[in-house]
Image (cartoon, helix red, strand yellow):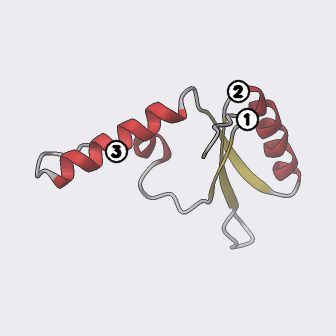
Amino acid sequence: PASGKAKKKVTLMGSGAILTEVVKAAQLLAEEGIEAEVFSVTSWSELARDGLACEQRALSGEEAGTAFIAQQLGKGSKAPIIAATDYVRAVP
């Protein structure tokens, strides 16, 4: 930007009914001059499984590859990542 200041950025991730609220949050952030990139997550479980599979391959000495979420977010991003979901799981 012309002012010399880096633009503030954030990554918002949401799923289910809460995604509507994530989009509203992005709009509010934009009004405050914060650029928000929104990702719609269809399966938190699949993202976790994919990441764990990459880690397990790396630990076993295989070519780990890059987890899907890392490919989407980009390796060089320094923006905070905020995830919101209405998924509830009972924990004993």
> Residue 88 location in percent, x, y?
68, 36
- Determine which residue is flagged by label 2: 16
Query: In this orientation, which residue lies closer to the viewer: 1 or 51?
Result: 51
Report the residue that reaches farthest toward the front.
92
| The quadrant where residue 76 appears | bottom left
Is the residue 46 above or below the residue 78 in the image? above
Give me the residue at 72% from left, 51% from top.
35
Image check: 29 left or right of 79?
A: right
Image location (x, y in percent) of residue 11: 64, 49
Label 1 and label 3: CA atoms lie apart by 23 Å
Q: Position of residue 47 (x, y in %)?
A: 45, 36
Q: Which label number is shown at residue 52?
A: 3
Q: Amino acid at mark 1?
A: Asp
Q: Earlier in the sequence, mark 1 or mark 3?
A: 3
x 20%, y 51%: residue: 58
* Mark positioned earlier in the residue sequence (3 or 2): 2
User: Residue 86 bears which disc, if any?
Assistant: 1
Q: Amino acid at mark 2?
A: Gly
